[in-house]
Image (cartoon, grey):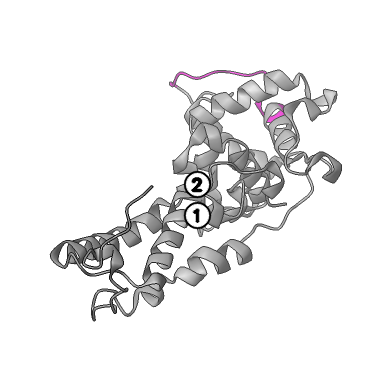
């Protein structure tokens, strides 16, 4: 059986009051944590738009980005794959990533095999998507649509690009989550923001944790109040995110 702490041990001491200055008084306001964690992820979702083939203006806005990365097109004097119909392949990818499962199936994104046969082999379309993800196309386009001076034709496909990015979060990794948050494009995330890893939030709280650790080392018998311990535990969970994200949590 575990030993009971003695009356003199730190574990037996009641929680101590919070020392003045240990927590910055403007912590919540300075980092706008309420807005960061809850308000922005709800108010900055991109309105869903029905899929439609790319217009000529939209394709003209996208083609230079594909050519620069050798995604179906090759810029003059640069190596890159050449595809017979890159515009059609991009349409097929956008159609696939915007397909949804029914509520009876659990909601969320549909499998690649749900792509209608008119768009070609779904395996070929999926391979193009993954290859272009590794080349950085989807994150490049996400940055492009978020620029203040982005062409209207590019902004018109924001929802399709958000769907493309969140489809490949596992391929593109943490940098995709960071970029979507920093750009305020929360529809590019595969789940509500507070359930995903947040290194920026971790960076905010690291100095605070270090300050508490140094104070605790200098005052071995000091015990943090329960409210402070609960706050730090919650921030730790929020910064780390969840390990499993159901598909049905995806935004529309």
Magenta residues, start to end: 77-88
Query: Do the residues bearing badges 2 and 1 touch, measured as CB atoms within 8 Å?
Result: yes
Q: Is mark 1 on a helix, strand or loop?
A: helix
Between 54 and 171, the residue placed more toward the observer is: 171
Q: x, y percentage for residue 130?
A: 58, 26
The residue pinned by badge 1 equals 181
- Relative to 87, 28 lies left or right: left
Reading the image, the residue beneath label 2 is 177
Residue 77 image position (x, y, % from top left):
43, 21
Residue drawn at the location 51% of the way across and 70% of the way down: 35
Q: In this view, does 37 lie above or below 180?
A: below
Q: Can residue 74 be seen in this view?
A: yes
- Report if residue 15 lies within the magenta region: no
Instruction: Report helix, strand or loop for mark 2.
Output: helix
Q: Position of residue 147 (x, y in %)?
A: 50, 55
Identify the image quadrant of residue 121: top right
Quick one: which residue is furthest to the left in this view? 218
Q: Is residue 119 left or right of residue 70?
A: right
């Amino acid at each position: 059986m575990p030993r009971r702490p003695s009356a003199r041990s730190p574990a037996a001491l009641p929680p101590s009051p919070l020392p003045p200055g240990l927590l910055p008084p403007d912590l919540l306001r300075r980092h706008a944590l309420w807005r960061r964690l809850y308000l922005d992820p709800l108010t900055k979702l991109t309105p869903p738009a029905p899929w439609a083939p790319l217009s000529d203006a939209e394709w003209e806005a996208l083609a230079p980005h594909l050519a620069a990365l050798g995604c179906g097109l090759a810029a003059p004097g640069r190596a890159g794959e050449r595809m017979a119909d890159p515009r059609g392949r991009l349409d097929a990818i956008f159609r696939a990533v915007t397909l949804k499962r029914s509520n009876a199936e659990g909601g969320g994104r549909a499998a690649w095999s749900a792509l209608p046969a008119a768009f070609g082999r779904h395996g070929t379309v999926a391979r193009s998507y993954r290859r272009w993800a590794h080349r950085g196309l989807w994150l490049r386009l996400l940055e492009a649509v978020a620029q203040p001076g982005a062409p209207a034709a590019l902004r018109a496909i924001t929802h399709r690009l958000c769907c493309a990015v969140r489809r490949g979060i596992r391929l593109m990794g943490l940098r995709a989550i960071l970029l979507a948050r920093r750009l305020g494009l929360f529809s590019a995330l595969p789940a509500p923001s507070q359930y995903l890893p947040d290194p920026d939030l971790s960076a905010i709280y690291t100095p605070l944790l270090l300050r508490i650790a140094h104070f605790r080392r200098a005052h071995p018998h000091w015990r943090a109040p329960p409210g402070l311990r609960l706050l730090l535990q919650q921030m730790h969970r929020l910064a780390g995110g969840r390990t499993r994200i159901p598909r049905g949590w995806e935004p529309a």
